[in-house]
Amino acid sequence: MRISLLAGTVAGLLLFSALFSGLFSGPARAASRIAQAGLLEDMGGDVVAQTCDIPEIRPGSVASLKRFYRAMAGCADRFWAGRFAQARLPYAPPEVTITTGSDSVCGEITSNGAQYCPEQRTIAIRIMKHDLRDPFRMNIAHSVAHEWGHHVQQLIGVLDAQNALSWQASGSARALLSHRLEMQAECFAGVLYSATLESIKPGIEWDDWIDAVRRADESEIHGKPRNLAFWQERGYRGGATGFCNTWTAATSKVG
């Protein structure tokens, strides 16, 4: 899934430059301050299952897919509202737009089918023909879970910080920042699944899903599939956002 990163304000850039000066020479030290600590330091306790009413998808039915997406959005919203409340942080849900076309509030939706628009705080979803023909529940659910992870990053300051740092970086340094961002969104998706997977009725066993993620094609933006699988699994098994600090992880785990 693609994320559309937009420019922040000058004041925001100055703030994040001050916070993360020296990131490239000392990424672990600086990145530990990349977001409000109340969420990323929470290693949590026992995972409490959350019941979500996620409907069936009828092949060929646009209306059916829209209902599924809306139900997944409601599920993710309720989950993250609760986590933010526990951390005593302000929370607001993103807008969710669903279309069969390619236009969105922040540009063209790619063939991946979903993207997050930070400036508009919107998850833009495109219903793809292959999802209509052969709807795979877990794959479709993941487009919501992953992009909601980017919204969480927006709310806690990660997206603005990463965007500001990307302006100063080039080549492999910029790619690594993108990988850290995407893998954290994968981990946040795993945290969501830790409480909701049974309700989603994914149509695949968890270990088989992670194996499929591990064997997917490599993405320049997202990084190595084995690392994406590692972070999603880490979030799922850990069940708390404190397991998702990709910014202090070794390069080998986010490359």
Image (tube, rainbow, N blue to C red):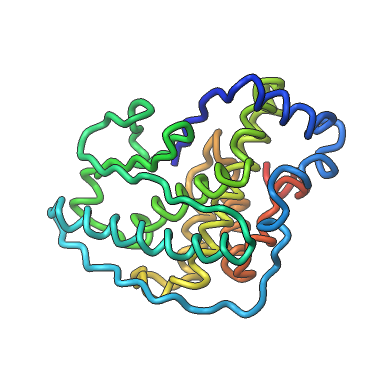
Q: Residue at x 60, y 48 (%)?
A: 183
- Residue 28 on image: x %, y %: 82, 44
Q: How many marks?
A: 0
Q: Is residue 103 above or below residue 239?
A: above
- For the point 29% across and 55% down, the residue is 69
Residue 231 in percent (x, y) is at: 62, 57
- In the picture, the quarter occupied by the N terminus is top left
169 relative position to 212: left or right: right
In the picture, measured across the screen, residue 68 lies left or right of residue 51, that is left
What's the residue at 70%, 64% (across, down)?
42
* Picture coordinates of residue 236, whole percent (x, y): 57, 67
| Quadrant in the rendering for residue 220 | top right
Q: Is residue 103 left or right of residue 168?
A: left
Q: Say which residue appears at 51% left-offset and 26% top-offset.
A: 6
139, 77: nearer the viewer: 77
Q: Nearer the viewer, residue 142 or 103?
A: 103
Residue 4 place in picture, x, y as percent? 47, 31
Which of 247/227 is in front? Answer: 247
The quadrant in which residue 20 appears is top right
Q: Quadrant of residue 122?
A: top left
Compared with 215, 237 (above or below) is below
**Viewer-side residue, 60 vs 190:** 190
Quadrant (top left, top right, bottom left, bottom right) of the C terminus: top right
